[in-house]
Image: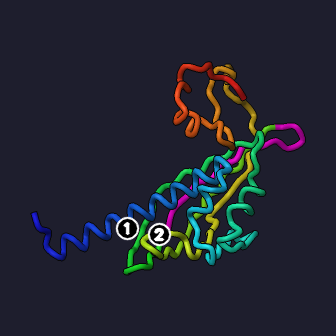
């Protein structure tokens, strides 16, 4: 079945939007799991990322972000919400709403930080691949809260980690569901 030009153009745009959305998801996983390879796959080498309190070139972004979030006990999670992608040939513009959560300790007390930000991005397609060429992070609000009460019996849960032992990587090696949970 042959497609008319209008339908073919719409399908191309949908595939481009999907590829860009995948970059956004890879970025979030890369940061949360401290995966430098995944973070690096999101940027063109000459990209600029302006997070407000820091600015870095794409070639240095993975190492810079890794050094900020480092593997360790502090947990992190990015939740990608609304994402509007506007494709214009080999350039695209995206506005993505993100909630970024971090659990950490201060003075031996547990705290959580919540940030509501927007990734305002310019993507470019080079050699058939979409990557970030410019990012500005717009902070809409943020807060830090002391944890007053936590769930009991958390030793029974399977926890994420900021390394290749995280369940998202471990399940690919097989047998994860057969190993006991509760390691922290």
In-front residue for pair 84/38: 38
Residue visible at 65% across and 36% down in the picture: 165
Q: Mark 2 or mark 1, which is nearer the start of the sequence? A: 1
Who is closer to the viewer here, 75 or 67? 67
Q: Which of 60 and 87 is in front in this view?
A: 60
The quadrant holding residue 155 is: top right
The quadrant of the picture occupied by the N terminus is: bottom left
Instruction: Mark 1: give few (<14), some (14-19) or many (20+) Cα within 10 Å.
Output: many
Residue 18 is inside the magenta segment: no
Provide the residue designation for mark 1. 16
Q: Where is residue 96 in the image (x, y as percent from the top left)?
A: 50, 64
Residue contact between numbered discs 1 and 2, judged by CB atoms under 8 Å:
yes
Residue in the picture at 65% in, 41% down: 164
Quadrant assignment for the C terminus: top right
- Residue 90, by quadrant, is bottom left
Q: In this view, does 164 lie to the left or right of 18?
A: right
Mark 2: few, some, or many residues within 10 Å (few <14, many ≥20)?
many
The magenta stretch spans residue 103: yes
Q: Which residue is drawn at 53% across and 23% down?
A: 177
Q: How far apart are marks 1 and 2 (CA)?
A: 8 Å
Residue occupying the point 34% across, 64% down: 15
Mark drawn on residue 159:
none
Q: Reply above or below: 152 against 105.
A: above
In this picture, which residue range is highlighted in magenta? Answer: 94-109
Q: Where is residue 159 in the image (x, y as percent from the top left)?
A: 64, 32
Residue identified by numbered label 2: 130
Magenta region, main secondary structure? strand
Tell me where residue 60 appears, x and y as whole percent: 71, 68
Give the side of residue 177 with respect to residue 128, left or right.
right
Residue closest to the far left: 1
- Whole-percent x, y for residue 166 in the image: 62, 37
């Amino acid at each position: 079945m042959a497609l008319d030009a209008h339908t073919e153009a719409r399908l191309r745009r949908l595939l481009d939007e999907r590829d860009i959305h995948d970059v956004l998801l890879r970025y979030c996983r890369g940061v949360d799991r401290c995966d430098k390879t995944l973070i690096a796959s999101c940027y063109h080498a000459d990209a600029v990322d302006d997070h407000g309190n820091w600015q870095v070139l794409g070639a240095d972004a993975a190492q810079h972000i890794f050094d900020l979030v480092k593997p360790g006990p502090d947990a992190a999670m990015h939740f990608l919400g609304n994402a509007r992608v506007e494709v214009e040939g080999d350039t695209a513009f995206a506005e993505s709403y993100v909630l970024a959560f971090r659990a950490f300790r201060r003075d031996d007390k547990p705290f959580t930080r919540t940030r509501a930000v927007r990734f305002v991005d310019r993507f470019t397609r080079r050699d058939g691949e979409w990557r970030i060429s410019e990012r500005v992070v717009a902070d809409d609000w943020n807060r830090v809260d002391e944890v007053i009460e936590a769930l009991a019996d958390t030793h029974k849960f399977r926890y994420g980690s900021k390394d290749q032992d995280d369940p998202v990587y471990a399940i690919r090696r097989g047998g994860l569901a057969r190993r006991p949970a509760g390691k922290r």
